[in-house]
Image (cartoon, grey):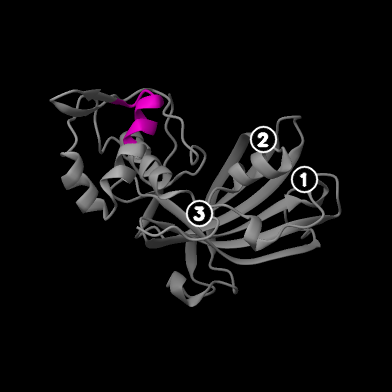
């Protein structure tokens, strides 16, 4: 695995991949993981990196490490994840989310979006989303302009919500998702594999900050042949 600028450290990428596999039921409570050396080889990482990921899982209460026996999954009802609010999974479940920024621009807010924030302008962030390397979706996020004068690509992490918390002191605490059928936007990059204008599954998200203000509106167009939208009730 490679770590690109703005991405999570590799050990946390592995942690998040395993957390999503647990949430999706691909790893079940009590399941014994493969020996660490075999698992590291399968993932293409060093054994030391894998052990850091497993230690993080143990800290979160998702792993029991038994001396002389091995590592065992401990599924809990609320596995804490950087991607807890990212609802797309591979068809078979799970998949590590990654993001590639296409464009970041400060613009007047479009009139066709729900009203949000206090500024007449917003930061428009367009990204390609992959799940374990497969192109699954494209998204357009609008962050209210009052939270930052400027947002640049180099500052963004894989998880925008993590960026919001650590750089803007903005916590997204709740969101409403509206799922419907839309058409592929004309800015969709070729690697998305869907032609502009073609019908496609679409999610409109309206997100609220810790003070109750509507801070962000986002639109996600996803390829139903690659991914599905999943929301689990705990």
Mark toward the start of the polypeptide (1 vs 3): 3
Q: Which residue is mark 1?
A: 116
Specify the quadrant of the image occupied by residue 22.
Answer: top left
Q: Nearer the viewer, residue 196 or 148?
A: 148
Specify the quadrant of the image occupied by residue 27.
Answer: top left
SS of the residue under disc 2: loop
Label 3 Cα neighbours within 10 Å, binned few <14 / some 14-19 / many ≥20: some
Q: Do the residues bearing badges 1 and 3 touch, measured as CB atoms within 8 Å?
A: no
- Which of the two marks, 1 or 3, is nearer to us in this view? 3
In what quadrant of the picture does the C terminus appear?
top left
Residue 182 in picture, x, y percent from top left: 55, 61
SS of the residue under disc 3: loop
- Which of the two marks, 1 or 2, is nearer to us in this view? 2
SS of the residue under disc 1: loop
Residue pictured at 17% horizontal, 31% vertical: 32
Q: Which residue is mark 2?
A: 171
Q: Which residue is mark 3?
A: 7
Magenta-tinted stretch: 54-63
Q: Do the residues bearing badges 1 and 2 touch, measured as CB atoms within 8 Å?
A: no
Q: Nearer the viewer, residue 181 or 189?
A: 189
In the image, is residue 157 above or below residue 234?
A: below
Q: Is residue 138 left or right of residue 135?
A: right
Residue 46 in picture, x, y percent from top left: 28, 50
Q: CA distance from mark 1 to mark 3?
A: 28 Å
Mark toward the start of the polypeptide (3 vs 2): 3
Residue 78 in picture, x, y percent from top left: 43, 25
Q: Is residue 225 visible?
A: yes
Residue pictured at 49% horizontal, 71% vertical: 198
């Amino acid at each position: 695995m490679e770590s690109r600028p703005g991405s999570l450290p590799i050990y946390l990428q592995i942690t998040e991949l395993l957390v999503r596999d647990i949430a999706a039921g691909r790893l079940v409570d009590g399941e014994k993981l493969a020996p660490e050396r075999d698992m590291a080889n399968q993932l293409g990482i060093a054994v030391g990196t894998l052990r850091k990921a497993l230690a993080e899982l143990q800290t979160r209460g998702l792993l029991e490490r038994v001396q002389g026996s091995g590592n065992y999954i401990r599924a809990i009802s609320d596995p804490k994840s950087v991607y807890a609010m990212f609802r797309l999974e591979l068809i078979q479940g799970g998949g590590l989310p990654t993001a590639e920024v296409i464009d970041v621009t400060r613009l007047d807010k479009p009139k066709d979006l729900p009203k949000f924030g206090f500024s007449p302008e917003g930061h428009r962030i367009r990204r390609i989303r992959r799940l374990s390397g497969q192109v699954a979706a494209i998204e357009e996020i609008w962050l209210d302009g009052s939270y930052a004068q400027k947002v640049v690509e180099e500052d963004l992490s894989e998880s925008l919500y993590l960026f919001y918390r650590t750089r803007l002191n903005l916590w997204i605490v709740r969101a409403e998702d509206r799922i419907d059928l839309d058409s592929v936007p004309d800015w969709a990059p070729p690697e998305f594999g869907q032609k502009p204008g073609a019908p496609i599954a679409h999610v409109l998200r309206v997100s609220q900050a810790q003070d109750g203000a509507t801070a962000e509106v986002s639109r996600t167009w996803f390829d139903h042949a690659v991914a599905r939208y999943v929301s689990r009730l705990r």
